[in-house]
Image (cartoon, grey):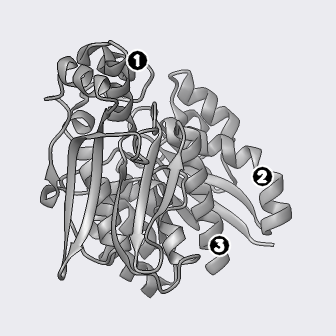
Amino acid sequence: MPHIHIVMIGFGNVGRALARLLQRKRALLEGEYGFTFQVNGIATGQHGSAIDPLGLDLERALALAEGGGSLSALSARPAPKNMLEFIQACPGDVLFENTPVNVQSGEPAISHLKAALERGMHAITANKGPVVHAYRELSALAAVRGRRFLFESAVMDGAPIFSLFRGPLPAAELRGFKGILNSTTNLILEMMEQGRSFEEAVAHCQKIGLAETDPSGDVDGWDASIKVAALSTVLMGVPLKPQQVEREGIRGITPGMVAEAKAAGERWKLVCSARRAGGEVKGRVAPQRVGPNSPLYSVGGSSSYVQFETDVLPGLGIVESDPGPETTAYGLLADLINALRSA
C-alpha cells in the first residue's frame, strides 16, 4: 500500500481545514482509496516552518498555529525560511500550495509549484494565479515528470468544475459561461437590498472572514476577473489574463439603485461571463440587474453559480451554497485522490 509524504506551503484557514479533513478521512483514504499518508513539512509566513521526515503531529501543528505559536517547535531539524529552499529540503510526494493569490503575476506560487514538479511531486493548489499565468507551462512540466498539476479549488472551492470537463463531458465544446463567481460581492449586494449601506455590508464580510482588510480585490472585480480568466484558459483553451477581462466592480451601485431594482422585482448581481468570438474569448465582469426568470436571481448569500453553454448541452448549471475553508479543503483532497489514481 502506498504511503504518501505530504508537504504544505501555507497553513492559513484553508491549510488548517485541509489538515483536519485529512485527519478525519484517514481511515477512509486507507480503506477505500488504498493509501496512507503523513505530513513531512509545513511552511508558513507567520507561524514558522517545520520538517520531520518521520511525520509531523498534525494535531500539535493545528494547536500551535491557532494559538499563535511557532511550528518550528515541531521541526526535527532547522527548516529553511526561504520557501524554495524548504521545498528542496523537505522529502515529499505531494505539495499543497496555499499561499495568497497574486492577480498580477501568479508569483510566488508558480515558482513553488514548479519546484515541486521538478522534484517529482504532484503539485496541487487552490491558488488561481498559477492557473491563469502558468497553466500551460506547469501542465507541460507535470507531463514530462509523470506527475499532476491540479487546482480544482481555484474556482468555486470544492465544486467539480475543472474535473467535470476532464471526465464526465467528453467531446463537449464549451461555447461560453455566465455566473456569480465572487461570493463576497453577492453577500454585499444582498445586504444592501436588506437596507444596509455599502460600508456596513463590507464591514460585515470582513468581520466574518469573507473579505480581506483591503476589500478591493472583491468589490472592484479583480477576484471575479481572475476566475473568468482561469475558466477560459483551462476549459476553453484560450489563455486569458485578468487584465484582459472587461471589468467593473460594485462600488458604483448605490442604495437608491438597489431600491429601484427591488421595486421592479429585480436584483443586482456581479455577473461573470465569457464567450467565444471567432478564435478569441471575450470575458466580462460587471454588475447587472436580473429578474426572477434568471437562474442568477435566487443565488443568495455567499453562494456561487455558473452555467455553461456547450455545443451539446445548451445549459448546464452548478451551484455551490455558502462555501468556506472546508469546501476548499475538499477540492484539494479530491485533487490528491485523483492525482494518485492516475500516477
Q: Earlier in the sequence, mark 1 or mark 2?
A: 2
Q: CA distance from mark 1 to mark 3?
A: 38 Å
Secondary structure at badge 2 equals helix
What's the amino acid at mark 1? Answer: Lys
Q: Residue furthest front?
A: 264
45 left or right of 312 in image: left
In the image, what residue occupies the spot 41% across and 65% down?
308
Secondary structure at badge 3 equals helix
Q: CA distance from mark 2 to mark 3?
A: 15 Å
Residue 295 placement (x, y as % from top left): 43, 48
Give the tally of numbered discs: 3
Q: Is residue 289 visible?
A: yes
Would you name the residue on which mark 1 appears?
Answer: 207
Residue 282 placement (x, y as % from top left): 18, 66
Would you name the residue on which mark 3 appears?
Answer: 340
Residue 246 placement (x, y as % from top left): 14, 54
Q: Are marks 1 and 3 in contact (CB under 8 Å)?
A: no
Would you name the residue on which mark 2 appears?
Answer: 26
What's the amino acid at mark 2? Answer: Arg
In the image, what residue occupies the spot 60% across and 45% down?
18
Q: Earlier in the sequence, mark 2 or mark 3?
A: 2
Q: CA distance from mark 1 to mark 2?
A: 33 Å
